[in-house]
Image (cartoon, rainbow, N blue to C red):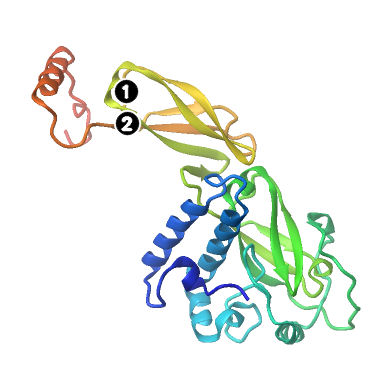
Amino acid sequence: MPRDPYEVLGVSKSATPEEINKAHRKLSKKYHPDRNPGDKQADANYKEVQTAHDILGDPDKKAQYDQFGFAGTQSGFPGGGGGFPGGGFPGGGQMDPEAAQRLFDMFGGGGAGGPDLSDLFGGGRRKTRSRSRPRAEPIESDVTIPFDVAANGGSVGLEFGGRHIDVKVPAGIEEGKRLRVPADATGGQEVLLRVKIAPHPFFRREGNDLYLDVPLTLVEAVLGAKVDVPTLDGSKLALVTVTVPPGTSSGRKLRLRGKGVAGGDQYLVFKVEVPAGQVDEKSRELITAFAQLNPQNPRANAPWV
Protein backbone atom coordinates (compact mmCIF):
# COMPACT_ATOMS: atom_id res chain seq x y z
CA MET A 1 0.00 0.00 0.00
CA PRO A 2 1.19 3.56 -0.67
CA ARG A 3 2.19 5.79 2.21
CA ASP A 4 -0.30 8.07 3.92
CA PRO A 5 -0.36 11.30 1.83
CA TYR A 6 -0.33 13.39 5.02
CA GLU A 7 2.89 11.65 6.02
CA VAL A 8 4.37 12.13 2.54
CA LEU A 9 3.75 15.89 2.58
CA GLY A 10 4.57 16.23 6.28
CA VAL A 11 1.29 17.95 7.18
CA SER A 12 -1.45 17.19 9.71
CA LYS A 13 -5.02 16.25 8.85
CA SER A 14 -6.08 19.71 10.00
CA ALA A 15 -3.71 21.42 7.53
CA THR A 16 -5.21 24.21 5.43
CA PRO A 17 -5.11 24.14 1.59
CA GLU A 18 -2.40 26.81 1.74
CA GLU A 19 -0.26 24.66 4.05
CA ILE A 20 -0.75 21.62 1.80
CA ASN A 21 0.19 23.55 -1.34
CA LYS A 22 3.21 25.09 0.40
CA ALA A 23 4.47 21.65 1.47
CA HIS A 24 3.90 20.34 -2.06
CA ARG A 25 5.90 23.16 -3.65
CA LYS A 26 8.75 22.75 -1.15
CA LEU A 27 9.06 18.98 -1.64
CA SER A 28 8.61 19.20 -5.43
CA LYS A 29 11.52 21.59 -5.55
CA LYS A 30 13.62 19.39 -3.24
CA TYR A 31 13.12 16.14 -5.15
CA HIS A 32 12.71 17.50 -8.71
CA PRO A 33 14.61 15.37 -11.29
CA ASP A 34 16.44 18.45 -12.59
CA ARG A 35 17.97 18.95 -9.16
CA ASN A 36 18.71 15.27 -8.62
CA PRO A 37 19.83 13.84 -11.98
CA GLY A 38 20.21 10.08 -11.89
CA ASP A 39 18.94 9.81 -8.29
CA LYS A 40 16.31 7.05 -8.40
CA GLN A 41 15.27 7.56 -4.77
CA ALA A 42 14.71 11.28 -5.33
CA ASP A 43 12.70 10.45 -8.45
CA ALA A 44 10.54 8.01 -6.48
CA ASN A 45 10.08 10.59 -3.71
CA TYR A 46 9.11 13.22 -6.30
CA LYS A 47 6.44 10.96 -7.81
CA GLU A 48 5.16 10.06 -4.33
CA VAL A 49 4.80 13.78 -3.51
CA GLN A 50 2.76 14.37 -6.70
CA THR A 51 0.48 11.42 -5.89
CA ALA A 52 -0.08 12.70 -2.34
CA HIS A 53 -0.94 16.18 -3.62
CA ASP A 54 -3.36 14.71 -6.20
CA ILE A 55 -5.39 13.50 -3.22
CA LEU A 56 -4.95 16.23 -0.61
CA GLY A 57 -5.00 19.07 -3.13
CA ASP A 58 -8.50 18.09 -4.30
CA PRO A 59 -11.15 18.85 -1.64
CA ASP A 60 -13.44 16.00 -2.79
CA LYS A 61 -10.67 13.40 -2.91
CA LYS A 62 -9.32 14.62 0.44
CA ALA A 63 -12.75 14.23 2.05
CA GLN A 64 -13.14 10.72 0.64
CA TYR A 65 -9.64 9.74 1.75
CA ASP A 66 -10.25 11.08 5.26
CA GLN A 67 -13.38 8.92 5.49
CA PHE A 68 -12.47 5.75 3.58
CA GLY A 69 -8.68 5.79 3.07
CA PHE A 70 -7.25 5.03 -0.37
CA ALA A 71 -10.36 3.10 -1.40
CA GLY A 72 -12.35 6.33 -1.11
CA THR A 73 -10.29 7.97 -3.86
CA GLN A 74 -11.17 5.31 -6.46
CA SER A 75 -13.63 6.01 -9.25
CA GLY A 76 -16.77 3.95 -8.78
CA PHE A 77 -16.47 3.97 -4.99
CA PRO A 78 -19.73 5.30 -3.52
CA GLY A 79 -19.22 9.07 -3.38
CA GLY A 80 -15.61 8.65 -4.62
CA GLY A 81 -13.61 11.34 -6.30
CA GLY A 82 -12.42 9.76 -9.56
CA GLY A 83 -9.18 8.08 -8.51
CA PHE A 84 -7.37 5.26 -10.29
CA PRO A 85 -7.86 1.76 -8.89
CA GLY A 86 -4.75 0.40 -7.31
CA GLY A 87 -3.03 3.71 -6.77
CA GLY A 88 -2.69 4.23 -10.52
CA PHE A 89 -0.01 6.93 -10.55
CA PRO A 90 3.74 7.28 -10.38
CA GLY A 91 4.66 6.47 -6.81
CA GLY A 92 1.21 5.02 -6.12
CA GLY A 93 0.58 1.72 -4.37
CA GLN A 94 -1.62 -1.25 -5.19
CA MET A 95 -5.16 -2.16 -4.27
CA ASP A 96 -5.94 -5.46 -2.59
CA PRO A 97 -6.88 -7.90 -5.42
CA GLU A 98 -10.23 -8.80 -3.87
CA ALA A 99 -11.11 -5.12 -3.44
CA ALA A 100 -10.05 -4.44 -7.02
CA GLN A 101 -12.26 -7.29 -8.23
CA ARG A 102 -15.23 -5.86 -6.38
CA LEU A 103 -14.62 -2.47 -8.00
CA PHE A 104 -14.37 -4.08 -11.44
CA ASP A 105 -17.70 -5.76 -10.81
CA MET A 106 -19.20 -2.40 -9.86
CA PHE A 107 -17.81 -0.88 -13.06
CA GLY A 108 -19.26 -3.61 -15.22
CA GLY A 109 -16.01 -5.36 -16.06
CA GLY A 110 -13.61 -4.92 -18.92
CA GLY A 111 -15.37 -3.37 -21.90
CA ALA A 112 -13.03 -2.39 -24.75
CA GLY A 113 -14.48 0.96 -25.80
CA GLY A 114 -12.79 3.69 -27.82
CA PRO A 115 -10.08 3.51 -30.49
CA ASP A 116 -7.23 1.04 -30.17
CA LEU A 117 -4.25 3.05 -28.94
CA SER A 118 -2.23 0.08 -27.80
CA ASP A 119 0.89 1.62 -29.35
CA LEU A 120 0.86 4.14 -26.49
CA PHE A 121 1.85 1.44 -24.05
CA GLY A 122 4.89 -0.74 -23.53
CA GLY A 123 5.26 -3.82 -21.39
CA GLY A 124 3.30 -5.07 -18.44
CA ARG A 125 0.64 -6.91 -20.47
CA ARG A 126 -0.70 -10.33 -19.83
CA LYS A 127 -3.57 -12.33 -21.17
CA THR A 128 -6.86 -12.07 -19.35
CA ARG A 129 -9.89 -14.27 -19.65
CA SER A 130 -12.66 -12.73 -21.70
CA ARG A 131 -15.87 -11.71 -20.00
CA SER A 132 -19.27 -11.38 -21.56
CA ARG A 133 -20.30 -8.22 -19.81
CA PRO A 134 -21.83 -4.93 -20.99
CA ARG A 135 -19.51 -2.13 -22.02
CA ALA A 136 -18.77 0.17 -19.08
CA GLU A 137 -18.03 3.86 -19.07
CA PRO A 138 -14.30 4.70 -18.88
CA ILE A 139 -12.77 5.50 -15.52
CA GLU A 140 -11.62 9.10 -15.38
CA SER A 141 -8.78 10.23 -13.15
CA ASP A 142 -5.82 12.61 -12.92
CA VAL A 143 -2.16 11.93 -13.54
CA THR A 144 0.67 14.33 -12.68
CA ILE A 145 3.48 14.43 -15.25
CA PRO A 146 6.94 15.88 -14.55
CA PHE A 147 7.53 19.25 -16.23
CA ASP A 148 10.36 18.03 -18.46
CA VAL A 149 8.44 14.91 -19.58
CA ALA A 150 5.45 17.06 -20.59
CA ALA A 151 7.78 19.38 -22.50
CA ASN A 152 10.01 16.85 -24.25
CA GLY A 153 7.91 13.68 -24.25
CA GLY A 154 8.61 10.41 -22.49
CA SER A 155 6.57 8.04 -20.36
CA VAL A 156 5.02 7.73 -16.91
CA GLY A 157 4.57 4.47 -15.01
CA LEU A 158 1.23 3.39 -13.59
CA GLU A 159 0.37 0.53 -11.23
CA PHE A 160 -2.99 -1.06 -11.97
CA GLY A 161 -4.27 -4.15 -10.20
CA GLY A 162 -0.78 -5.49 -9.64
CA ARG A 163 0.57 -4.80 -13.13
CA HIS A 164 2.89 -2.02 -14.29
CA ILE A 165 2.02 -0.01 -17.40
CA ASP A 166 4.24 2.57 -19.12
CA VAL A 167 2.13 5.25 -20.78
CA LYS A 168 3.87 7.26 -23.47
CA VAL A 169 3.49 11.04 -23.23
CA PRO A 170 3.72 13.10 -26.45
CA ALA A 171 6.10 16.08 -26.46
CA GLY A 172 4.40 19.40 -25.71
CA ILE A 173 1.30 17.96 -24.04
CA GLU A 174 -0.66 20.65 -22.22
CA GLU A 175 -2.42 20.77 -18.86
CA GLY A 176 -5.95 19.39 -19.06
CA LYS A 177 -5.35 17.12 -22.06
CA ARG A 178 -6.22 13.45 -21.72
CA LEU A 179 -4.33 10.22 -22.18
CA ARG A 180 -6.40 7.13 -22.98
CA VAL A 181 -5.48 3.75 -21.49
CA PRO A 182 -7.40 1.01 -23.36
CA ALA A 183 -9.02 -1.84 -21.48
CA ASP A 184 -6.65 -4.45 -22.92
CA ALA A 185 -3.72 -2.60 -21.37
CA THR A 186 -5.28 -2.35 -17.90
CA GLY A 187 -6.68 -5.85 -17.98
CA GLY A 188 -10.06 -4.54 -16.89
CA GLN A 189 -11.51 -1.21 -17.93
CA GLU A 190 -10.64 1.71 -20.17
CA VAL A 191 -9.14 4.70 -18.32
CA LEU A 192 -8.99 8.38 -19.27
CA LEU A 193 -6.20 10.29 -17.54
CA ARG A 194 -6.50 14.06 -17.20
CA VAL A 195 -3.03 15.55 -17.41
CA LYS A 196 -1.65 17.76 -14.67
CA ILE A 197 1.86 19.15 -15.12
CA ALA A 198 4.09 19.40 -12.06
CA PRO A 199 5.68 22.83 -11.46
CA HIS A 200 9.33 23.40 -12.34
CA PRO A 201 11.70 24.94 -9.76
CA PHE A 202 12.42 27.96 -11.98
CA PHE A 203 10.81 27.67 -15.46
CA ARG A 204 7.26 28.82 -16.17
CA ARG A 205 5.33 27.62 -19.20
CA GLU A 206 2.78 29.54 -21.25
CA GLY A 207 1.63 27.48 -24.20
CA ASN A 208 4.83 26.37 -25.91
CA ASP A 209 6.91 29.27 -24.53
CA LEU A 210 9.10 29.09 -21.44
CA TYR A 211 9.82 32.00 -19.09
CA LEU A 212 12.80 32.34 -16.77
CA ASP A 213 13.46 35.15 -14.27
CA VAL A 214 17.12 36.24 -14.43
CA PRO A 215 18.45 38.45 -11.59
CA LEU A 216 20.96 41.19 -12.45
CA THR A 217 23.14 43.42 -10.33
CA LEU A 218 22.79 47.18 -10.65
CA VAL A 219 26.16 47.33 -12.41
CA GLU A 220 25.19 44.59 -14.90
CA ALA A 221 21.92 46.36 -15.65
CA VAL A 222 23.58 49.75 -16.21
CA LEU A 223 26.73 48.70 -18.07
CA GLY A 224 25.57 45.46 -19.68
CA ALA A 225 27.07 42.01 -19.09
CA LYS A 226 27.35 38.43 -20.26
CA VAL A 227 25.52 35.93 -18.04
CA ASP A 228 24.92 32.16 -18.15
CA VAL A 229 21.30 30.98 -18.12
CA PRO A 230 19.76 27.47 -18.25
CA THR A 231 17.69 26.13 -21.13
CA LEU A 232 15.60 22.96 -21.17
CA ASP A 233 17.48 20.56 -23.42
CA GLY A 234 15.77 17.18 -23.35
CA SER A 235 15.87 15.65 -19.88
CA LYS A 236 18.81 17.82 -18.76
CA LEU A 237 19.58 21.51 -18.37
CA ALA A 238 22.05 23.20 -20.71
CA LEU A 239 23.69 26.54 -19.96
CA VAL A 240 23.99 29.20 -22.66
CA THR A 241 25.71 32.59 -22.46
CA VAL A 242 23.61 35.63 -23.34
CA THR A 243 24.47 39.31 -23.63
CA VAL A 244 22.57 41.73 -21.42
CA PRO A 245 22.31 45.11 -23.21
CA PRO A 246 23.49 48.22 -21.31
CA GLY A 247 20.64 50.09 -19.64
CA THR A 248 18.46 47.02 -18.99
CA SER A 249 15.54 47.66 -16.65
CA SER A 250 13.59 45.14 -14.55
CA GLY A 251 10.92 43.43 -16.64
CA ARG A 252 12.80 43.66 -19.93
CA LYS A 253 12.63 40.41 -21.92
CA LEU A 254 15.16 38.70 -24.14
CA ARG A 255 13.97 35.96 -26.50
CA LEU A 256 15.87 32.75 -27.19
CA ARG A 257 14.36 31.41 -30.40
CA GLY A 258 13.44 27.74 -30.49
CA LYS A 259 14.45 27.09 -26.88
CA GLY A 260 10.89 26.58 -25.66
CA VAL A 261 8.54 23.59 -25.89
CA ALA A 262 7.85 21.90 -29.25
CA GLY A 263 9.40 24.73 -31.28
CA GLY A 264 8.34 27.54 -28.95
CA ASP A 265 10.67 30.21 -27.58
CA GLN A 266 12.27 30.85 -24.19
CA TYR A 267 12.01 34.33 -22.70
CA LEU A 268 14.46 35.70 -20.16
CA VAL A 269 12.79 38.21 -17.82
CA PHE A 270 15.43 40.40 -16.18
CA LYS A 271 15.07 41.47 -12.55
CA VAL A 272 17.44 44.16 -11.29
CA GLU A 273 18.43 43.61 -7.66
CA VAL A 274 20.01 46.33 -5.52
CA PRO A 275 21.98 45.86 -2.29
CA ALA A 276 19.74 45.46 0.73
CA GLY A 277 19.95 47.84 3.68
CA GLN A 278 22.05 50.98 4.07
CA VAL A 279 25.05 51.69 1.83
CA ASP A 280 28.27 53.19 3.10
CA GLU A 281 29.01 56.90 2.69
CA LYS A 282 31.45 56.46 -0.19
CA SER A 283 28.96 54.41 -2.18
CA ARG A 284 26.26 56.97 -1.48
CA GLU A 285 28.49 59.74 -2.86
CA LEU A 286 29.26 57.75 -6.01
CA ILE A 287 25.60 56.91 -6.65
CA THR A 288 24.60 60.53 -6.05
CA ALA A 289 27.25 61.68 -8.51
CA PHE A 290 26.01 59.11 -11.05
CA ALA A 291 22.43 60.39 -10.67
CA GLN A 292 23.57 63.96 -11.23
CA LEU A 293 25.46 62.97 -14.37
CA ASN A 294 22.56 60.89 -15.66
CA PRO A 295 19.33 62.71 -14.74
CA GLN A 296 16.28 60.52 -15.11
CA ASN A 297 12.58 60.66 -14.24
CA PRO A 298 11.13 57.16 -14.82
CA ARG A 299 7.68 58.30 -13.65
CA ALA A 300 7.42 61.19 -16.13
CA ASN A 301 5.04 59.21 -18.36
CA ALA A 302 3.31 57.24 -15.63
CA PRO A 303 -0.50 57.08 -16.07
CA TRP A 304 -1.12 58.82 -12.74
CA VAL A 305 1.06 61.85 -13.56
Q: Amino acid at mark 2?
A: Ser
Q: Nearer the viewer, residue 289 or 44?
A: 44
Find residue 250 and name its label. 2
Calculate the distance from the C-alpha at mark 2 to the C-alpha at mark 1: 8 Å
Dot 2, how many residues are within 10 Å of its Cα: few (below 14), some (14-19), or many (20+)? some
Left or right, 44 with respect to 153, comes to: left
Which mark identifies residue 95? none
Of pointers 2 and 1, the one earlier in the residue sequence: 1
Which percent across, then down, holds residue 126?
Answer: 87, 69
Q: Is residue 145 visible?
A: no
From the viewer's perspective, is 78 left or right of 245? right
User: Are the residues at dot 2 and dot 1 in contact (C-beta closer than 8 Å)?
Assistant: yes
Mark 2 element type: loop
Q: Residue furthest top?
A: 293
In the displayed structure, 258 sits above or below 167; it is above
Rendered-image quadrant of the N terminus: bottom right
At 38% from the left edge and 19% from the top edge, which residue is drawn?
Answer: 225
Of marks 2 and 1, the one in the foreground: 1
Element under disc 1: helix
User: Residue at (84%, 61%) from the top-left corner?
Assistant: 116
Please name whichever residue, 205 or 282, is drawn nearer the observer in this view of the structure: 282
Q: Specify whether 254 is left or right of 18.
A: right
Q: Nearer the viewer, residue 300 or 211?
A: 211
Instruction: Say which amino acid is labelled 1.
Output: Ala
Pointer 1: what residue? 221
Quadrant of res 2: bottom right
Q: Is residue 24 above or below residue 111?
A: above
Q: Position of residue 24 (x, y in %)?
A: 46, 61
Tell me which residue sits at (60%, 59%) in the image. Answer: 44
State the image coordinates of residue 140 (x, y, percent, origin top left). Answer: 66, 70
Residue 80, x across and y down, in percent: 59, 81
Q: Is residue 241 visible?
A: yes
